[in-house]
Amino acid sequence: MNYETRLTANQGVELLSEEEAARQARRRRLMIGVVALIAVAFAGLLAYRAFFGGAGTDAAPSQAMPVVTVIQPGQQAVDHVISVTGTLAARREMPVGVAGEGGMVSRVLVEPGQWVSAGQVLATIDRSVQVQTNAQLAAQINVARADARLAQSELDRAQSLVSRGFISKADVDRRTATRDSAVARVRVAEASLGESRARTDRLDIRAPEAGMVLTRNVEPGQVVSSGSGVLFRMAKGGEMELLARLSETDLSGLPVGAQAAVTPVGTDRSFTGRVWQVSPVIDPATRQGIARLALPYDPAIRPGGFATARIVRGTQQQPLLPESAVLSDEKGNFVYLVGKGNKVERRPVTTGTVTATGIAITSGLNGTEKVVMRAGGFLNPGETVKPALAGKN
């Protein structure tokens, strides 16, 4: 059997068994644990009293109630902001193609990003054949005019001789008809030349309105026709927009003219826009509609890009609370109030817009209540507290 020695009170030596030594070690560890637990509990009590402003341990029971800071939020003007995402696009996109017969492109005169005026030539198509046709028609006009002058001269001579009886009235009528026919042929030839010139002019691909060229899909040497599709895309006046997708709830009360701050992806710059059109239909698959936000031109706004926006739907009078005052659990959002008899009450609320100064409360409060600003997690409904109004001693 193992033994160990210890000094007795009279400095004698006593032998202890191994089992007894183990029991004494366990008792020492237990006593140390109890002392540590008491110390932790005492420190927690001191922290609780210091946090809630309670009195010392020797204070009266009426002074030992925790002090909580409360606020009476009242009613404040709160902007109802809707956060949305969408795609940037030209407000009025103009596709430009071949309006005439087409042919081989001889020159392309513009590049994407370039500003053009109304009627400016964007590209030209070879017109060598049309030039010769126009020259031929111009010559035919000269021939018709010569015939018309000759017919008029013969008619004039006939009219001078009919009174003398050298020419009958029937001959005069025939010469008159010949003159009229010659004049008509002149007009036909002039009309043919005008038509040919108009067709030739349509070989110039022109900008329908002033604006900015977005895309170019044609190169010199390419053969194009009316079936070639879109050769250029333009933004009328350089005006841009954001096609923002909103839920049908947000879309229903969105007014035309509402202001918005639009931030394209890839930049920290925001641009001021306004709602200029609200979609009259809702997509049955997504339950969303489109709000179109007009934007001024800026190189950072690129059609086809992605952007976020904050639309100010309107301003309402609502209570505004700091974020520390609003709590939530499985039942939803709520706040703690200090009611009659300084008793803590739980009040469910509905939150609205989150601003830089706090959270708007859309329902549950009228603004006259005393709302606990912080430390609500340490309170329980029915607990008696000592309220201290924020900003006052």
Image: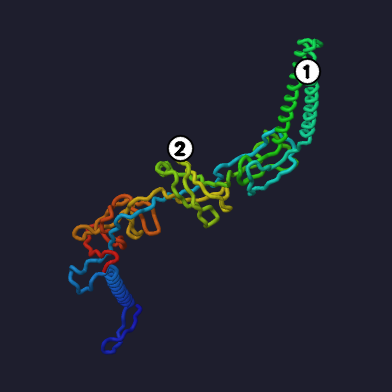
- Number of residues whose C-alpha sits closer than 10 Å to that of mark 1, classed few (under 14), some (14–19) or many (20 or more): many
Identify the image quadrant of the C terminus: bottom left
What's the distance in space between the residues labelled 1 and 2, CA to CA? Answer: 71 Å
| Residue on which the image places disc 2 | 280
Q: Secondary structure at mark 1?
A: helix
Amino acid marked by disc 1: Leu
Badge 2, how many Cα within 10 Å: few under 14, some, many 20+?
A: few
Closer to us: 194 or 169: 169
| Above or below, comparing residue 346 to residue 253 in the picture | below
State the SS at label 2. loop
The single residue placed furthest to the bottom in the displayed view is 11
- Number of the front mark, 1 or 2: 1
Question: Residue 74 falls in which quadrant of the image?
Answer: bottom left
| Tag 1 near tag 2, CB within 8 Å | no
What percent of the width, then of the height, locates residue 357? 38, 59
Q: Which of the two labelled residues, at mark 1 and mark 2, occupies the earlier sequence position?
A: 1
Q: Which amino acid type is marked by label 2?
A: Pro
Vertical relation: 378 (above or below) 300: below
Image quarter hosting the N terminus: bottom left
Say if 1 sits above or below 236 in the image: below
Q: Would residue 325 be found to the left or right of residue 257 on screen?
A: left
Residue pointed to by mark 1: 155
